[in-house]
Amino acid sequence: MGSLKDQLLAKGLATKPAAKASGSAKGPATAPGPAPIDPAAARRKQEEEAAAAAHAASSPSYPGARIVTLSAARELFEPHAYDLRNLSGEVEGLVDIETLLLPSVQVIDGDVTLDELRTRQEGSNLYVLGNLTITGRLLQPFRSNAIVVFGSLRAHHIVTGAELLVFGDLDVTGVLYGNCTNYATNVLGTARVATLASCKEHMFSFWGARTIGELVRRHTAPNFEIYAAAKGIKTGRVFDPAIGDPYDEASVAAALQARDDIFVDP
């Protein structure tokens, strides 16, 4: 498939580098001019960038974040393009970079520690170029923006119905709850999760080493059979009916604010 830049070249979203000059018996060498750009592709790129800039300007700002262009956001993935193209192993999964770009991107440079982080529906995607530490809850409501952590992510609880990508390690000391069939949680480093809970067959793709204490699921979830086969993992408990609808992220998030253990024996 080539590098990320090769893929952009194929789509007409990048220009080819000028070729090196070569000598000639007929006279001094001259370097050829830049390769022509497809006008339609260039116009499409300009429109996409303008729409992203307008969206980011009207979206809530994350603490310490800056707005970046879509081109700059794509460049951040270039050092990781090989790893993303060659994900393999016993788990299922896929990372589509394009889904992590639109409608706009905000970036936090370096490490950040927050008591709580809540993403917004139709908000900007958030990239953290260092480590992200959440002492309380990380909340991603259904169809809210993606989070990409280029370092490691540590949180007490995570409630997600959106896209989450971690290039480093993931440490969740409480519950990691997923509730969306359209989006996934991808971890390229080591995943350490006390309790992993899936409702709507949420895809948890832990590509590296993993340590999971307990599995709780409503239906057969992708990769869960592989995780359940590991030695010492606890299974069989269910969501406590007292918390309300287990398919409702708000109910689960509220329960995890009031208590750490939201599961009971059947």
Image: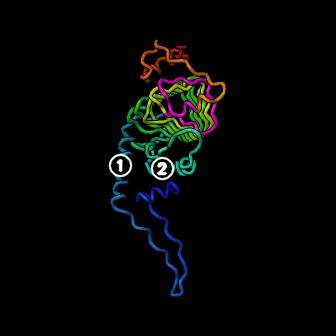
Query: Is label 2 in contact with label 1 (beta carbons under 8 Å)?
Result: no
Question: In the rendered image, which residue does mark 2 sit on?
Answer: 74
Mark 2 neighbour density, 10 Å: few (under 14) some (14–19) many (20 or more): some
In magenta stretch: residue 211 = yes
Mark 1 neighbour density, 10 Å: few (under 14) some (14–19) many (20 or more): some
* Residue 130 seen in this snapshot: no
Distance from Cα at disc 2 to Cα at disc 1: 16 Å
- Please identify the quarter of the rendering in which residue 194 is found: top right
Taking the image as shown, residue 14 lies to the left or right of residue 81, namely left
Taking the image as shown, residue 53 lies to the left or right of residue 212, namely left
Label 1, secondary structure: give it: helix
Question: In the rendered image, which residue does mark 1 sit on?
Answer: 50
Out of 157 and 182, give the one closest to the viewer: 182
Which mark sits nearer the N-terminus, 2 or 1?
1
Rendered location of residue 256, percent (x, y): 51, 19
Name the colour scheme.
rainbow
Residue range (magenta): 203-225
Rendered location of residue 129, percent (x, y): 55, 42
The amino acid on which the numbered mark 2 sits, given as a three-letter code, is Arg
Out of 139 and 55, give the one closest to the viewer: 139
Going 55% across and 30% down the picture, which residue do you hit? 224
Out of 40 and 219, give the one closest to the viewer: 219
Going 50% across and 30% down the picture, which residue do you hit? 221
Label number found at residue 16: none
In magenta stretch: residue 68 = no
Q: Which of marks 2 and 1 is in front?
A: 2
Taking the image as shown, residue 52 lies to the left or right of residue 172, namely left
Taking the image as shown, residue 251 lies to the left or right of residue 92, namely left
Out of 67 and 39, give the one closest to the viewer: 39
The amino acid on which the numbered mark 1 sits, given as a three-letter code, is Ala
